[in-house]
Amino acid sequence: MTLEVLDIESLDLEARGIARREGKVVFVDGALPGERVLARMGRSKPSYDTARVERILRTSSQRVDPPCPYFGVCGGCAMQHLEPAAQVAVKQRVLEDALAHIGKLRSQRILPPMHGPALGYRYRARLSVRLVRKKGGVLVGFRERRGSYVADMASCLVLPPHVSDMLMPLRHLIATLSKPDRIPQIELAVGDTVTALLMRHMEPLLDSDIDLLRDFAQAHNVCWWLQPKGPDTVHPLDPEDVDRLAYALPEFGLRMPYRPTDFTQVNHAINQVLVSKALSLLDVQPQDRVADLFCGLGNFTLPLATRAAQVTGVEGSAALTDRASDAAKRHGLQDKTRFATLNLFEVDVAWLRGLGHFDRMLIDPPREGAEAVARALVALTPDERPRRIVYVSCSPGTLARDAGILVNEGSYSLAGAGVVNMFPHTGHVESIAVFEAV
């Protein structure tokens, strides 16, 4: 494979440098914008080439030494070699480009990015487990970058320190179980007072295995959950652990119970900032009636209920709306909240109109976005529309598409948009946007 000198123009969301060679895009592993590199050319596709850095000829001022010794091998992080503030700037550029190219619009105001801790932030993770005898036994960790093998890692800087310290004990524990080769993964969920470990096991556990799990739980302050078959078989090893897992929203006096399989934000510190910012942008008034679409466990619904007259949460999962309703009752908010279970990807204006008028609306969809909701909103008459919408997104592309529907139909203006650095050192772009009725 040939060596080429390349000038790096920008960065993609896999943290590959982007260069051009004879008019063709080249994705360069290990390169940063502004650098000149000697790169070894790799695969050639009709529309792009790939390469990897052999030597840096001109170094970016934003390059830093990766803090993790496994960076470059482990696939958990992609941007540790880029200064954290520069990572945020890259994500902001991705958001602005998506709004411009997909939505054909520009935000009236760029919201300040939401920052949090760059290390020790990852309170949710799926750890792969693999018995690899030639590497000395069981591996527990993230998969290797651009590969299916499990990285041989003894620690992880983006996991909370107490979880990082558990990786080697977990390897030893799994190796001592009766069927270590039949345990493919462990899901992690860190709550405020306890850490839950959900083990997928393909063979029944023996009594001796259960004893080992309980000893580990006592030594490391964890509670075990087990999944012998499909998702509906998930259960706590000890029934009294069923409600131990929870996270706090202290600004609103809330404690939010959840199960290890429920969707919650990976970064609890940023989630607290995000909830506070979303309510501030909505500017909820005591007399307002508010809708929270894709409400999940009520992460926004319950805080909204402490500020508004009435909040309606809608979500596609009955398990989540049931838990949201239970949490509302625990906090004495049942009279100010109601929850409905519905597929929000198939709604129309008649359904939305049937809910009655909302003064404000919060939308927090999965990666697929909220196209049906956006089309229903623009079909409302001006008097029927919510005056303000806050849209929390985990995909710049679908946010831009839906923003284009809301704005280009003439119903709303895009008053502000900005990024939320929910996943430092990765290419994941979380963002928030606020729309005003026109």
Image (cartoon, rainbow, N blue to C red):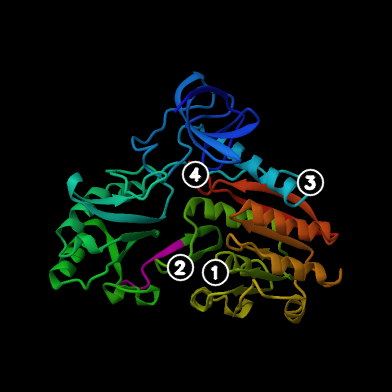
* Residue 283 in view, yes or no: no
Q: Residue at x 13, y 69 (%)?
A: 208
- Cα gap from disc 1 to disc 3, whole angstroms: 30 Å
Is residue 245 toward the left or the right of residue 319 in the image? left
Mark toward the start of the polypeptide (3 vs 2):
3
- Cα gap from disc 4 to disc 1, whole angstroms: 24 Å
Question: Which labelled disc corresponds to residue 108?
Answer: 3
Residues tagged 4 and 3 counted as in contact (Cβ below 8 A): no
Q: Nearer the viewer, mark 4 or mark 2?
A: 4
Q: Is residue 359 above or below residue 27?
A: below
Location of residue 293 by image quarter: bottom right
Neighbourhood count class around disc 2 (C-alpha, 10 Å): few under 14, some 14–19, many 20 upward:
some
Mark toward the start of the polypeptide (1 vs 3):
3
Which sits in the foreground, 335 or 88?
88
Percent position of residue 218, x then y: 21, 61
Mark toward the start of the polypeptide (4 vs 2):
2
Question: Which labelled disc corresponds to residue 426?
Answer: 4
Q: Which residue is tagged 1?
A: 296
